[in-house]
Amino acid sequence: WRATQADLERRAAAAEAELARAREALERAEPIRRDLEEARRSRQTETARADAADARNAVLSADNDELRAETRSCQEKLLQALSLLEEYQEEMTDMSSRKRTGLPSRVDALSKPRTPPVSAARR
């Protein structure tokens, strides 16, 4: 009986020593665990920030594409307006020279009502 009791006491002492070593290891691991947890939280925060930045970039890219299309449209309209202005200036120059020579201008001709030509059959 005493041998069994001594064996149990020895086992209990060994278990207590093992428990003390485990507690020490846990205490040493705690700062590492906290650092890992903080890194995980930080990574989640950075991921959320990156996702938000990606979303903002997508919106800005869409806005940029829209502005480019608008700019192209405005450039086309401007080119059309410049072309019309050039035509107008040419017509004004032509009118001025025709007035000096006494010939009717295109504007004069277009402003008068047109009469259809008389066909040979109607004569």
Image (spheres, rainbow, N blue to C red):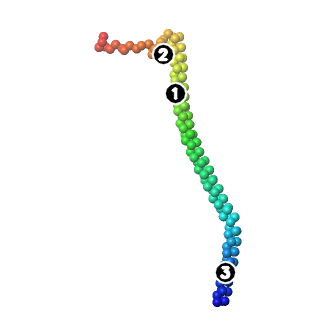
Q: Nearer the viewer, residue 85 or 28?
A: 28
Residue type pointed to by label 1: Gln
Q: Locate the C terminus and report the quarter of the image it occupies.
A: top left
- Percent position (x, y) of residue 92? 53, 17
Q: Circle 2 sits in a helix, a strand or a loop, which is it?
A: helix
- In the picture shown, does residue 109 fall above or below 40? above
- Mark 1, residue position: 80
Identify the element where label 1 is drawn.
helix
Q: Is residue 9 found left or right of 62 in the rendered image?
A: right
Question: Quarter holding the N terminus?
Answer: bottom right
Question: In front: mark 3 or mark 2?
Answer: 3
**Type of amino acid under label 3:** Ala
Residue at numbered disc 3? 12
Badge 1, how many Cα within 10 Å: few under 14, some, many 20+? few
Q: Name the N-terminal-most of marks 3 and 2.
A: 3
Q: Position of residue 71 (x, y in %)?
A: 56, 34
The amino acid beneath tag 2 is: Val
Pointer 3: residues within 10 angstroms few (<14), some, or many (20+)?
Answer: few
Q: CA distance from mark 3 to mark 1?
A: 98 Å
Q: Is residue 15 above or below residue 43?
A: below
Earlier residue among tags 3 and 1: 3
Say which of 84 and 39 sits in front. 39
The disc at residue 107 is 2
